[in-house]
Image (cartoon, helix red, strand yellow):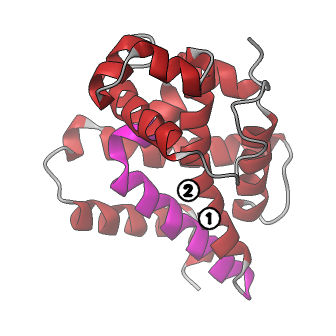
Amino acid sequence: MSATSAVGRAAMSDLPSAAQARIISSALDLFARHGVGGTSLQMIADDIGVTKAAVYHQFKTKDEIIIAAAESELARLEKVIDAAEGEASPAKVRRTLVTGMIDLAVARRRTASTILNDPLIVGLLAGHEPSRRVMNRLCRVLMGGDIGHESRVSTAMFAAAISGAVMHPLVNGLDDKTLRSQLQQLTQRLLPSIRG
Protein backbone atom coordinates (compact mmCIF):
# COMPACT_ATOMS: atom_id res chain seq x y z
CA MET A 1 0.00 0.00 0.00
CA SER A 2 1.23 3.48 -0.81
CA ALA A 3 1.64 5.95 2.01
CA THR A 4 -0.46 8.44 0.11
CA SER A 5 -3.53 6.23 -0.15
CA ALA A 6 -6.78 7.39 1.38
CA VAL A 7 -7.35 6.68 5.03
CA GLY A 8 -11.06 7.31 4.94
CA ARG A 9 -10.56 11.05 5.30
CA ALA A 10 -9.87 13.59 2.57
CA ALA A 11 -7.30 15.60 4.51
CA MET A 12 -5.62 15.82 7.90
CA SER A 13 -8.04 18.54 8.97
CA ASP A 14 -11.05 16.21 8.56
CA LEU A 15 -12.12 14.60 11.79
CA PRO A 16 -12.24 10.82 12.08
CA SER A 17 -15.48 9.12 13.06
CA ALA A 18 -15.96 8.17 16.71
CA ALA A 19 -15.08 4.55 15.90
CA GLN A 20 -11.96 5.60 13.99
CA ALA A 21 -10.94 7.90 16.85
CA ARG A 22 -11.14 4.99 19.33
CA ILE A 23 -8.97 2.86 17.06
CA ILE A 24 -6.46 5.68 16.56
CA SER A 25 -6.26 6.38 20.29
CA SER A 26 -5.75 2.71 21.08
CA ALA A 27 -3.19 2.34 18.30
CA LEU A 28 -1.17 5.32 19.55
CA ASP A 29 -1.10 3.90 23.06
CA LEU A 30 -0.14 0.43 21.85
CA PHE A 31 2.45 1.80 19.40
CA ALA A 32 4.04 3.74 22.27
CA ARG A 33 4.21 0.60 24.44
CA HIS A 34 5.05 -2.07 21.85
CA GLY A 35 6.25 -0.21 18.77
CA VAL A 36 4.38 -0.33 15.51
CA GLY A 37 5.86 -3.68 14.51
CA GLY A 38 4.90 -5.18 17.88
CA THR A 39 1.29 -4.04 17.65
CA SER A 40 -1.20 -6.21 15.79
CA LEU A 41 -4.69 -5.39 14.61
CA GLN A 42 -5.94 -8.01 17.05
CA MET A 43 -4.23 -6.17 19.92
CA ILE A 44 -6.00 -2.96 18.89
CA ALA A 45 -9.34 -4.77 18.63
CA ASP A 46 -8.85 -6.41 22.04
CA ASP A 47 -7.86 -3.09 23.62
CA ILE A 48 -11.09 -1.38 22.57
CA GLY A 49 -13.29 -4.44 23.02
CA VAL A 50 -14.31 -5.09 19.41
CA THR A 51 -13.63 -7.75 16.84
CA LYS A 52 -10.78 -7.55 14.37
CA ALA A 53 -13.44 -7.34 11.65
CA ALA A 54 -14.79 -4.18 13.28
CA VAL A 55 -11.32 -2.62 13.03
CA TYR A 56 -11.11 -3.66 9.38
CA HIS A 57 -14.49 -2.04 8.79
CA GLN A 58 -12.95 1.33 9.73
CA PHE A 59 -9.48 0.87 8.21
CA LYS A 60 -8.61 -1.53 5.41
CA THR A 61 -5.00 -2.09 6.52
CA LYS A 62 -2.64 -1.54 9.40
CA ASP A 63 -0.82 1.03 7.25
CA GLU A 64 -4.01 3.11 7.14
CA ILE A 65 -4.18 2.99 10.95
CA ILE A 66 -0.52 4.01 11.20
CA ILE A 67 -1.06 6.96 8.89
CA ALA A 68 -4.27 7.99 10.66
CA ALA A 69 -2.50 7.81 14.03
CA ALA A 70 0.40 9.89 12.72
CA GLU A 71 -2.05 12.37 11.17
CA SER A 72 -3.81 12.81 14.52
CA GLU A 73 -0.49 13.76 16.11
CA LEU A 74 0.48 15.97 13.18
CA ALA A 75 -2.87 17.78 13.50
CA ARG A 76 -1.86 18.74 17.05
CA LEU A 77 1.42 20.11 15.72
CA GLU A 78 -0.46 21.99 12.99
CA LYS A 79 -2.51 23.78 15.65
CA VAL A 80 0.73 24.89 17.31
CA ILE A 81 2.08 26.13 13.96
CA ASP A 82 -1.21 27.96 13.27
CA ALA A 83 -0.99 29.72 16.65
CA ALA A 84 2.64 30.69 16.03
CA GLU A 85 1.88 32.07 12.58
CA GLY A 86 -0.77 34.29 14.14
CA GLU A 87 1.81 36.19 16.21
CA ALA A 88 2.91 39.69 15.23
CA SER A 89 6.70 39.60 15.46
CA PRO A 90 9.24 37.01 14.34
CA ALA A 91 10.45 36.55 17.92
CA LYS A 92 6.89 35.91 19.16
CA VAL A 93 6.26 33.54 16.26
CA ARG A 94 9.31 31.46 17.15
CA ARG A 95 8.65 31.62 20.92
CA THR A 96 5.04 30.49 20.45
CA LEU A 97 6.13 27.66 18.17
CA VAL A 98 8.86 26.42 20.50
CA THR A 99 6.62 26.66 23.57
CA GLY A 100 3.91 24.73 21.76
CA MET A 101 6.37 22.07 20.58
CA ILE A 102 7.63 21.62 24.13
CA ASP A 103 4.11 21.51 25.56
CA LEU A 104 3.10 18.84 23.03
CA ALA A 105 6.21 16.77 23.62
CA VAL A 106 5.86 16.88 27.41
CA ALA A 107 2.13 16.17 27.37
CA ARG A 108 2.52 13.30 24.91
CA ARG A 109 5.93 11.95 25.93
CA ARG A 110 5.61 8.37 24.68
CA THR A 111 3.51 9.14 21.63
CA ALA A 112 5.69 11.94 20.23
CA SER A 113 8.80 9.82 20.44
CA THR A 114 7.07 6.89 18.75
CA ILE A 115 5.81 9.00 15.85
CA LEU A 116 9.20 10.57 15.23
CA ASN A 117 11.36 7.48 15.75
CA ASP A 118 9.53 4.31 14.76
CA PRO A 119 11.04 3.10 11.47
CA LEU A 120 7.70 1.90 10.08
CA ILE A 121 6.04 5.25 10.73
CA VAL A 122 9.01 7.21 9.41
CA GLY A 123 9.00 5.10 6.25
CA LEU A 124 5.28 5.54 5.63
CA LEU A 125 5.36 9.27 6.30
CA ALA A 126 8.32 9.85 3.97
CA GLY A 127 5.95 9.65 1.00
CA HIS A 128 2.93 11.14 2.76
CA GLU A 129 2.21 14.59 1.34
CA PRO A 130 0.18 15.99 4.28
CA SER A 131 2.99 15.12 6.68
CA ARG A 132 5.61 16.72 4.40
CA ARG A 133 3.51 19.90 4.26
CA VAL A 134 3.35 20.09 8.06
CA MET A 135 7.10 19.49 8.37
CA ASN A 136 7.84 22.15 5.74
CA ARG A 137 5.63 24.63 7.60
CA LEU A 138 7.38 23.79 10.86
CA CYS A 139 10.75 24.39 9.22
CA ARG A 140 9.66 27.69 7.63
CA VAL A 141 8.22 29.05 10.87
CA LEU A 142 11.11 27.91 13.07
CA MET A 143 13.81 29.05 10.66
CA GLY A 144 12.18 32.27 9.53
CA GLY A 145 11.08 31.29 6.04
CA ASP A 146 14.11 29.35 4.84
CA ILE A 147 13.61 25.65 4.07
CA GLY A 148 17.01 24.88 2.57
CA HIS A 149 19.21 21.97 3.60
CA GLU A 150 20.70 23.67 6.65
CA SER A 151 17.28 24.76 7.91
CA ARG A 152 15.82 21.27 7.43
CA VAL A 153 18.68 19.66 9.34
CA SER A 154 18.48 22.31 12.08
CA THR A 155 14.73 21.79 12.44
CA ALA A 156 15.15 18.01 12.50
CA MET A 157 17.85 18.25 15.16
CA PHE A 158 15.78 20.65 17.24
CA ALA A 159 12.65 18.47 17.07
CA ALA A 160 14.66 15.33 17.78
CA ALA A 161 16.33 16.97 20.77
CA ILE A 162 12.98 17.88 22.30
CA SER A 163 11.29 14.54 21.57
CA GLY A 164 14.36 12.59 22.66
CA ALA A 165 14.77 14.57 25.86
CA VAL A 166 11.20 13.99 27.06
CA MET A 167 11.66 10.21 26.73
CA HIS A 168 15.20 9.93 28.03
CA PRO A 169 15.70 7.76 31.15
CA LEU A 170 17.44 10.67 32.89
CA VAL A 171 14.19 12.66 32.97
CA ASN A 172 11.75 9.83 33.77
CA GLY A 173 11.41 11.03 37.36
CA LEU A 174 10.84 14.68 36.47
CA ASP A 175 7.33 16.05 36.70
CA ASP A 176 5.91 17.77 33.63
CA LYS A 177 6.25 21.29 35.04
CA THR A 178 9.95 20.87 35.83
CA LEU A 179 10.69 19.18 32.51
CA ARG A 180 8.81 21.88 30.59
CA SER A 181 10.68 24.64 32.43
CA GLN A 182 14.08 23.06 31.80
CA LEU A 183 13.34 22.56 28.12
CA GLN A 184 12.20 26.18 27.81
CA GLN A 185 15.42 27.42 29.40
CA LEU A 186 17.61 25.23 27.20
CA THR A 187 15.80 26.14 23.98
CA GLN A 188 16.25 29.82 24.79
CA ARG A 189 19.99 29.22 24.91
CA LEU A 190 19.91 27.26 21.65
CA LEU A 191 17.66 29.74 19.84
CA PRO A 192 18.50 33.13 21.37
CA SER A 193 16.03 35.03 19.19
CA ILE A 194 13.07 33.52 21.08
CA ARG A 195 13.92 35.46 24.24
CA GLY A 196 12.66 38.77 22.80
Quarter of the image where one finds residue 182: bottom left
Between residue 175 and residue 165, name the one nearer to us: 175
Q: CA distance from mark 1 to mark 2?
A: 5 Å
Quarter of the image where one finds residue 60: top right
Give the residues in magenta.
88-113
Instruction: Give SS at disc 1.
Output: helix
Contact, mark 1 vs mark 2 (Cβ under 8 Å): yes
The amino acid beneath tag 2 is Arg
Residue under pointer 1:
79
Overall secondary structure of the magenta stretch?
helix
Q: Residue at x 29, y 20 (%)?
A: 46
Q: Position of residue 100 (x, y in %)?
A: 51, 66
Q: Residue at x 76, y 30 (%)?
A: 128
Q: Which mark is residue 76?
A: 2
Describe residue 155's horizontal placement relative to residue 168 as left or right. Answer: right
Task: Say if the magenta span includes residue 97.
Answer: yes
Outermost residue, left side: 173
Q: Position of residue 177 (x, y in %)?
A: 24, 68
Between residue 160 and residue 82, name the one nearer to us: 82
Q: Quadrant of the C terminus?
A: bottom right
Q: Position of residue 145 (x, y in %)?
A: 84, 63
The amino acid beneath tag 1 is Lys
Q: Which mark is residue 10?
A: none
Instruction: Give SS at disc 2.
Output: helix
Query: Is residue 60 something one can see in this rendering?
Result: yes
Describe residue 30's horizontal placement relative to residue 61 as left or right. Answer: left
Counting every numbered tag in the picture gives 2
Q: Position of residue 42 (x, y in %)?
A: 37, 12
Q: Quadrant of the N terminus?
A: top right
The 10 Å Cα crowd at callout 1, few under 14, some 14 to 19, many 20 or more, is few
The 10 Å Cα crowd at callout 2, few under 14, some 14 to 19, many 20 or more, is some
